Amino acid sequence: MKYIIFVFYFLFLAKSSILAQKSPVFTLVIDAGHGGKDPGKPRSKANLLDEKEINLLISLKLGSMIEHHYENVKVVYTRKTDEYVSLQDRVDITNRYKADCFLSIHGNSSRKKHIYGTQTHIHDQKSWKTNILAEQIDSALQHKAQRVSLGIQDHKDRKQHLFLLKKLTMPSVLVETGFLSHKADEVFLNSEQGQKLITNSLFRAFKNYLDKIKFHSVVRPQLVYKIQITASHKKIPLENELFDPLGVTVEEHFLPEKNDLFPFKYTIGHETEKKAVDKLLDWVRQRGFEQAFIITMRK
Ligand SMILES: [Zn+2]
């Protein structure tokens, strides 16, 4: 009896130590500059976007990439829609969530229309973490997005205080992704490809930042969505006419599990986004595979 109690006690201890070791959560605030009545730099042509819209597109995409990649990074947005948020409210939101890091995303503008390139702003150089984040952003924009960098600037360099950077005490950076007053920069930032390059660079910079500050990040297992067309107790040749209506390559997976009489699974698709696989499922069902359904697999 004594022995059994001891075992239970031991299990209890083991369980509580697992809980105590739960990985820490890192909170990142992503701040899409401007919004609502404040467009930032307005579009130069009707078919282009205002600065506030470009900032939001990049912010949302970056946040979702980070959340998809890390299990223990929480992303907070100061805005997720086209709404006006005052600078003080942005500070309050960031402090309320006790953010570990703050990143503000902007597009630049100058009366000198020939000026182009990125700028990375910090308050001062006192915080080593802020310096690392700024260096990583500046470097990724140059090497990954092939942007020309106008450098990292603190309040002395620019002879001006930036309200957000001055008020916030955690590592904080404001990035100017290009000059919307410059023709080519504006076209680049309006293009999907340009936004993607900027987003990927900021993601890379953030990833490097976490590594350099030695944050114990937990990467999510990368899953892909597939459509299961059918399952069978024995192999079906992939050239079988059953698959003809699909006209695409069908994959075979052998997944023997206890009590599963149909271990051979036949799928199509390799999607990382739910929306895309939903669309694919509709397509498959329209081709007569009404029993098809979505499955997830490790990449
Ligand atoms: Zn701005």
Image (tube, rainbow, N blue to C red):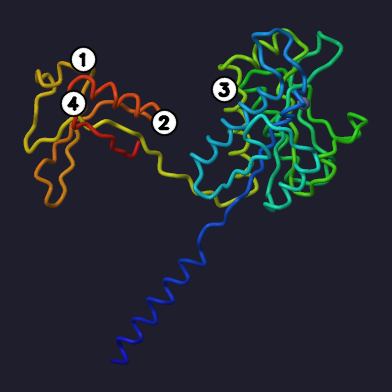
Residue at disc 4, secondary structure: loop
* Amino acid beneath label 4: Phe
Coordinates of residue 285 in the picture (x, y in percent) = 23, 25
Mark 1 or 4 closer to N-term?
1
Location of mark 4 (residue):
289
Task: Report, in whole angstroms, how far the alpha carbon at label 2 lies from the one at label 3.
Answer: 16 Å
* Amino acid beneath label 2: Glu
* Amino acid beneath label 3: Lys
Residue at disc 1, secondary structure: loop
Location of mark 3 (residue):
196
Mark 1 or 3, which is nearer the eye? 1
Between 288 and 211, which is closer to the camera in this rendering? 288
Quarter the N terminus occupies: bottom left
Mark 2 or 4 closer to N-term?
2
Coordinates of residue 139 in the picture (x, y in percent) = 68, 28
Farthest left residue?
234
Mark 1 or 2 closer to N-term?
1
Above or below 230: residue 11: below
Location of mark 2 (residue):
273
Task: Using a 10 Å C-alpha cutoff, classify the residue at mark 1 as few (fewer than 14 neighbours), some (14 to 19) or many (20 or more).
Answer: few
Above or below 102: residue 176: above
Mark 3 or 4, which is nearer the eye? 4
Task: Report, in whole angstroms, how far the alpha carbon at label 1 lies from the one at label 3.
Answer: 31 Å
Location of mark 1 (residue):
247
Task: Report, in whole angstroms, how far the alpha carbon at label 1 lies from the one at label 4.
Answer: 13 Å
In the picture, the disc for residue 86 is none
Task: Report, in whole angstroms, how far the alpha carbon at label 1 lies from the one at label 2.
Answer: 22 Å
Residue at disc 3, secondary structure: helix
* Amino acid beneath label 1: Gly
